[in-house]
Image (tube, grey):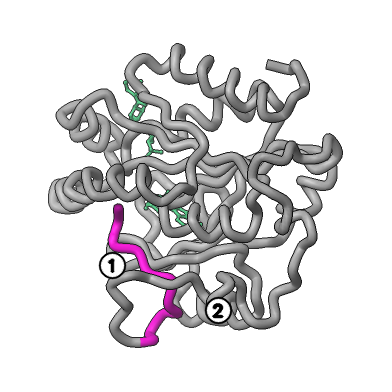
Amino acid sequence: MHESHAMPPGSGTPPTSPPPPGDSDGLPPDSPRDDDAMRGRDAPPPASTGLLLVVSGPSGVGKTTIVRRVLERFEGVFSVSATTRPRTAVETDGVDYHFLDEKTFQSWIDEDRFLEYAQVFGRSWYGTPREQIDSRLHEGRLVALDIDVQGAIQIRERMPESFGIFVLPPDDEELLRRLRSRGREDEATIERRHAEATREMRIARECGAYDEFVVNDDLDRVVEETIRLVGRRLGSGRA
Ligand code: ADP
Ligand code: 5GP
């Protein structure tokens, strides 16, 4: 897993086993409890509530590529996360991420604007803005989140009816090759992210936040597999 901690920016040394923000029930103290969140994980979501698809996997494994194609099939939408990470040359603010400074990210936390948030790679903060997610789900849309394992654990606690998929690489060398092929980071960053992958995959298997594990060996194959899994969960026969 990435070094990932759900503590506000600037709040000091993060705990080794990060708690979700707020109290022990995993919700911020003033967070409204959705009755839907109290339903069992296996209960099918009502047709009108769409589906929250949580996708995680090591950096460079192919999550963005897969999810874009799945969303095309279901006319779904990608949630745009906020992050304190610097924007890279190939990214656009408001499209790839909302790039925020730490002060602004903290103010979004204070205003309870995140469905989940975490510190990833031990340095930058990432969070899913609540805005538009609830409304899109109520419209019956498929909404996809590309978030790390800590975020997926928070979502599973708050929205047990969400659907979690973890994407695995075919092997270690191929993961490194894909990280390089994105042409986004310098070599030191690539190697640090690669080193996180093994730990992340182990925690993903143990944490219970994922319903399915798929291997991104052949892109067309894994896209079809993911479409089948999502279609089955939607129960719509649209796949
Ligand atoms: P992530 O979102 O997980 O960081 P990306 O979707 O950006 O990963 O993919 C990383 C790189 O790997 C991209 O260059 C993408 O085109 C490539 N890629 C994705 N899936 C495959 C695949 N099955 N075979 C070969 N290359 C792939
Ligand atoms: P990157 O910097 O490569 O775009 O993303 C790094 C990691 O942060 C990825 O594992 C990605 O899934 C995760 N991430 C992106 N957005 C969010 C978010 O909103 N919340 C959480 N918890 N993780 C995120």
Quadrant for ligand 1? top left
Q: Badge 1, how many Cα within 10 Å: few under 14, some, many 20+?
A: few
Residue at 49% across, 56% down: 153
Q: Badge 2, how many Cα within 10 Å: few under 14, some, many 20+?
A: some
Q: Secondary structure at mark 2?
A: loop
Left or right, 50 with reference to 205? right
Quadrant where the C terminus lies? Answer: top right
First in residue order: circle 2 vs circle 1: 2
Q: Name the amino acid type tagged 2.
A: Gly
Q: Which mark is residue 22?
A: 2
Residue at 73% across, 52% down: 39
Tell me how far mark 2 sits from mark 1, CA to CA.
20 Å
Left or right, 64 with reference to 188? right
Q: Name the amino acid type tagged 1.
A: Gly
- Of 161 and 87, the residue lying toward us: 161
Q: Secondary structure at mark 1?
A: loop
173 drawn magenta: no
7 drawn magenta: yes
Q: Are marks 2 and 1 in contact (CB under 8 Å)?
A: no
Residue 51 position within the rendered picture, expressed as x and y whole percent measured from the top left: 70, 39
Q: Main secondary structure of the magenta part?
A: loop
Residue 128 position within the rendered picture, expressed as x and y whole percent measured from the top left: 57, 59
Q: In the image, which is nearer the foreground, mark 2 or mark 1?
A: 2
For mark 1, what is the residue?
122
Q: Which mark is residue 36?
A: none
The answer to whether 86 is drawn above or below residue 181 in the figure is below
Q: Is mark 2 within 8 Å of ligand 2?
A: no
**The residue stretch that appears in magenta:** 1-11
Residue at 72% across, 58% down: 38
Residue at 53% across, 60% down: 154
